[in-house]
């Protein structure tokens, strides 16, 4: 009920993002139901039905990715002072985010079911003169348990993924976690250790004063209770506010991403050379290919997603090379700071674009004509990936709002900030654009021959 009330009272921009999640869930649920309809009308071809169901995994992954991005930027589930007193700590806010995501996805699944039943003619008769009855099995009764099971996949997977991503993992060292658990059972010192990781208590240095008073106030050990040999736990000193913070280190996924990308392209090249393996009749009018080609495509997309943050960080370093000015320093530093937040969605967009470019080269005819379901799936994957990238860009802009305001107070012109944003976008486009085209050509080469 709290998740529903937060959804009703949200900002219009937040509601728009949740509507996007609902629409993406509706599109994915409709494709899953269409795969069920094809399986019902083509009972003699179980391999083709399984292949069409497997192709729905790509829209499902894009929808889940969008749902996670929307949940991360939801202002209603951000930690605030005083929420822990009413039982809404990090775990409670994570549960609210998961429930809100489940509500949006369930609304989309309901819309998909209504559209599917309307096209089948179960509500008001066959629309479009029965043109959609061929792949919806309109002449057979719909098994509602199977349909509801398929429709429950998107809300279940999305909510579980959001709960896992937003879970309040304890990133403190092992010694600090052990001390917090030990002192948390006895005395006020444990309460101070527990409070310094959340809220305003640890930001003003109160934990340092408690740590300094504890050795002097401790009573001497008695003969029956010897002193513990463990050193006292002291708080780390606060960083000097007058010194600039060091930029984040380079993401560690670049070597792994390049390795997975290379393996994916190698698998596709090897699959194009072998002719003994029986081919798969790919849906949507595509030429037939071996299962290894599909595996190679999946590895290529995963490699681009893993290498995205590292490539974004590399763009920031290249911008600051060779005696940079203030504009290049600002643009490069922002790219290095936001490499993980922007790089991963950018890598996913690059993977989706390379897959779309590769599909255009694999049609049997010179003028490809996409079917209705292929068109829905293509627009769904493209829209979800682009929307996720835009949401990540907006999140990055809000994260550095204080820095932007400080630059404006210091006299930095607004045109310089806009020029820095344009320079960042141009640098990313100059690197990821040719990379997308090269990967698309290499991915389509084995099957185009």
Image (cartoon, helix red, strand yellow):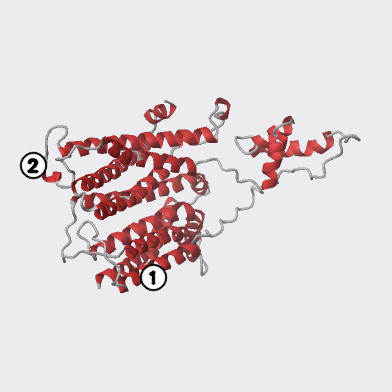
Say what secondary structure mark 2 lies in: helix
Instruction: Report the disc number at residue 266.
Output: 1
Residue that numbered label 2 is attached to:
129
Instruction: Report the disc number at residue 162.
Output: none
Residue shown at 15% from the left, 63% from the top = 367
In whole angstroms, how far apart are the C-alphas of marks 2 and 1? 47 Å
Which quadrant of the structure image shows residue 210?
A: top right
From the top left corner, tell me how far across and down residue 288 is, in percent.
24, 64
- Can residue 70 be seen by looking at this rendering? no
Say what secondary structure mark 1 lies in: helix
From the top left corner, tell me how far across and down residue 378 is, in percent.
26, 53
Position of residue 392 relative to residue 140, above or below, is below
From the top left corner, tell me how far across and down residue 201 is, in percent.
64, 34
Q: In which quarter of the image is the C terminus?
A: bottom left
User: Which sits in the foreground, 355 or 346?
Assistant: 355
Residue shown at 45% from the left, 48% from the top = 396
Which quadrant of the structure image shows residue 280?
A: bottom left
């Amino acid at each position: 009920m709290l998740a529903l009330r937060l959804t009703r009272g949200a900002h219009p921009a937040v509601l728009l993002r949740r509507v996007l999640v609902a629409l993406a869930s509706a599109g994915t649920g409709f494709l899953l139901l269409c795969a069920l309809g094809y399986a019902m009308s083509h009972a003699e071809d179980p391999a083709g039905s399984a292949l069409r169901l497997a192709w729905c995994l790509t829209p499902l992954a894009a929808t889940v990715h969008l749902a996670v991005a929307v949940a991360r930027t939801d202002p209603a589930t951000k930690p605030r002072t005083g929420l822990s007193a009413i039982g809404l700590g990090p775990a409670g806010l994570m549960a609210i985010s998961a429930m809100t995501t489940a509500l949006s996805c369930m609304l989309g699944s309901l819309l998909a079911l209504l559209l599917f039943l309307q096209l089948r003619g179960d509500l008001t008769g066959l629309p479009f003169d029965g043109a959609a009855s061929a792949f919806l099995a309109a002449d057979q009764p719909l098994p509602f348990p199977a349909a509801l099971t398929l429709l429950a996949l998107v809300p279940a997977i999305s909510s579980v993924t959001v709960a896992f991503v937003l879970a309040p993992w304890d990133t403190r060292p092992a010694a600090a976690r052990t001390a917090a658990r030990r002192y948390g059972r006895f005395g006020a010192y444990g309460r101070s250790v527990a409070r310094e990781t959340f809220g305003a208590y640890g930001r003003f240095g109160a934990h340092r004063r408690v740590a300094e008073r504890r050795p002097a106030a401790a009573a001497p050990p008695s003969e029956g209770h010897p002193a513990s040999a463990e050193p006292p736990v002291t708080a780390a000193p606060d960083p000097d506010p007058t010194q600039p913070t060091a930029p984040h280190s380079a993401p560690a996924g670049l070597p792994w991403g390049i390795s997975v990308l290379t393996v994916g392209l190698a698998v596709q090249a090897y699959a194009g050379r072998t002719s003994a393996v029986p081919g798969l009749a790919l849906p949507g009018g595509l030429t037939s290919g071996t299962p290894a080609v599909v595996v190679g495509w999946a590895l290529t997309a995963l490699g681009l997603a893993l290498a995205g943050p590292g490539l974004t960080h590399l763009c920031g370093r290249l911008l600051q090379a060779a005696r940079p000015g203030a504009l290049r320093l600002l643009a490069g530093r922002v790219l290095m700071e936001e490499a993980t937040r922007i790089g991963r969605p950018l890598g996913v967009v690059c993977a989706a674009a390379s897959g779309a470019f590769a599909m255009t080269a694999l049609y049997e005819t010179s003028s490809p004509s996409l079917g209705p379901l292929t068109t829905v799936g293509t627009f769904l994957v493209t829209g979800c990936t682009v929307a996720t990238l835009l949401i990540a860009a907006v999140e990055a802009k809000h994260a550095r709002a204080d820095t932007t305001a400080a630059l404006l107070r210091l006299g930095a012109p607004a045109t310089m900030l806009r020029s820095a944003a344009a320079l960042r976008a141009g640098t990313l486009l100059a690197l990821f654009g040719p990379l997308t085209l090269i990967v698309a050509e290499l991915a389509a080469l084995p099957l185009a021959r």
